[in-house]
Image: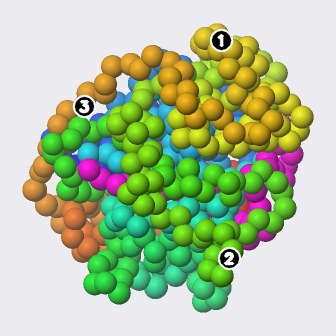
Amino acid sequence: MRIAVEGCAHGELENIYSTISEIEQKENIKVDLLICCGDFQSSRNEDDLTCMAVPPKYRHICTFYKYYNGEKKAPILTIFIGGNHEASNYLQELPYGGWVAPNIFYLGYAGVINIAGLRIGGLSGIYKGNDYLKGRFEKCPYNESTKRSVYHVRNLEVFRLKQISQPVDIFLSHDWPVGIYNHGNIGQLLKKKPFFKDEVESNQLGSRPCQELLNHLKPNYWFSAHLHCKFAALVPHENDSFTKFLALDKCLPRRKFLQIVNIEHDETQGVQIKYDLEWLAILRLTNHLLSVKSTVTYMPGPGSTERFDFTPSEEEKNLVFQKLNGILKVPKNFVQTAQGYSVGNKTHSRQPSIKLNPQTVELCKILGIDDPICLISESAGLNLSLDSSFKDSKSFISDSDNSCSDSESKLNESDNSSIQEKIKELKLPEPKFNQEKSSENEIDDKNDGLKVCEESPEKLSPKRVLDSEENEVSEEKSVIKDDNTPKKFKRRNAEIYNSEEIKS
């Protein structure tokens, strides 16, 4: 299976899909899946922009709304995790993952899915120690503090991922794992990014929770973004296995923001998203650990009087399988939960109120788990329902379900009916294998640095295009100014990612 891996998307979906299309035509290949490693910016409208942690003058709608509205459809099955520049109100509707637009799937705060026999996991957000032990207490409208803490990684998601026992093929994070630089060309990294030196020498650059997950999961591949540079590493494990790590840049001209990797898959399975039984069982078993308070919450461990090992048994996984009626395929139950952006339609933007998403409501009912939004609304004395959430949405068919009115805050497990009718199964071309190899020199000779990355560790060697952070903004401006091609690569919000925190 050919997979396109993107670093920070920053809302530039049209440019990303266009770049992939050019590669496909030039190389005579077919890309089967696009993976984005955060800063996706799924802004549906101007209200969503007010929930993104950027100064007002840098709020630009970009191009995601076209795929949300149905003006365009993603030409490739796309999955992504969250970063630190997101429409957090929208992603908060989907804590366990779901479709943000047709053919575009969010993994949630943390998640594991299966695509054509490949097991893909991910962790959204960035690590900040001050919020790591807190619950998911943030809700719209955000203040300037919660607008940032909402995308900070929590210990519950990391704890859940540590319960995984079966092998993981691909793992995604926005942050780099701490210490990953010790397994690549650290000299070249510091030559191009000298301001990383102090954090590297003190072993502080990156995320410690990601480092723990890397050592626990030992995935075959680990893809990251966040630091706006390309970096490759090969991490050995004690069982003689290796993790091929690759971080990529942001979507801008002449930056190495995209890489094509060819990974073996099950050719008998179609390219479609399926639930992971072990992961869903873990969600169900750890539901009682979910907190929506801003106070510190510790996870159970050895010596605790309660259960602390939530790796599910076969019986516990079979129970989930029965609740799904034996159907592992993720339903195509996307529904618009807010009006999309319309060019020329000037509105007074403001932060929206919290809303339920039918996809989350449905999954919670099937598994018997809680929607954090429901718990937050109850703690605030609100009686949130699907009716109240979508009374202003023309695309939602009213439902009489009072999803958050139960005082016990547990959703009915017996109602397995879908919120919407399932649409036809996604049909994509069968994956094609191409054994042609390209030399690394050929890759480096290209301005965009985009070529097929082979499976061997050598093809993931740390060939980087690293630009000094102090010169990033001026470089981006000069790229736009000197480029005589159409403005499809013009960066509308380039400067914000140099003024915002990008380090964990």
Q: Where are the magenta residues, as a range?
A: 117-146
The disc labelled 3 sits on which kind of residue?
A: Leu
Q: Quadrant of residue 431?
A: top left
Magenta-drawn stretch contains 321:
no
Determine if the magenta segment contains residue 141. Answer: yes
Residue topped by disc 1: 398
Distance from the alpha carbon under mark 1 to that under mark 2 = 45 Å
Give the residue at x 58% y 35%.
413
Q: Return the residue nearer the eye: 318 or 283.
A: 318
Q: Position of 148 compared to 215: left or right? A: right
* N-term-proximal mark, 3 vs 1: 1
Q: For marks 1 and 2, give the one nearer the viewer.
A: 2
Q: Mark 2 points at which residue?
A: 304
Q: Are marks 1 and 2 in contact (CB under 8 Å)?
A: no
Would you place residue 57 above or below residue 210 in this image?
Answer: above
| Quadrant of the rendered image containing residue 394 | top right
Question: In the displayed structure, does residue 457 sit left or right of residue 53?
Answer: left
Q: Main secondary structure of the magenta part?
A: loop
The residue labelled by disc 3 is 428
Q: Which amino acid does label 2 sit on?
A: Ser
Q: Is residue 231 above or below residue 20?
A: below
Name which of mark 1 and mark 2 comes first in the sequence: 2
Label 2 or label 3, whichever comes before in sequence order: 2
Looking at numbered disc 1 in the image, what kind of residue is underneath it? Answer: Ser
> Residue at the location (82% across, 54% down)?
293
Could you say where residue 466 lies in the image, as x and y percent from the top left?
48, 68
Viewer-side label of 2, 3: 2
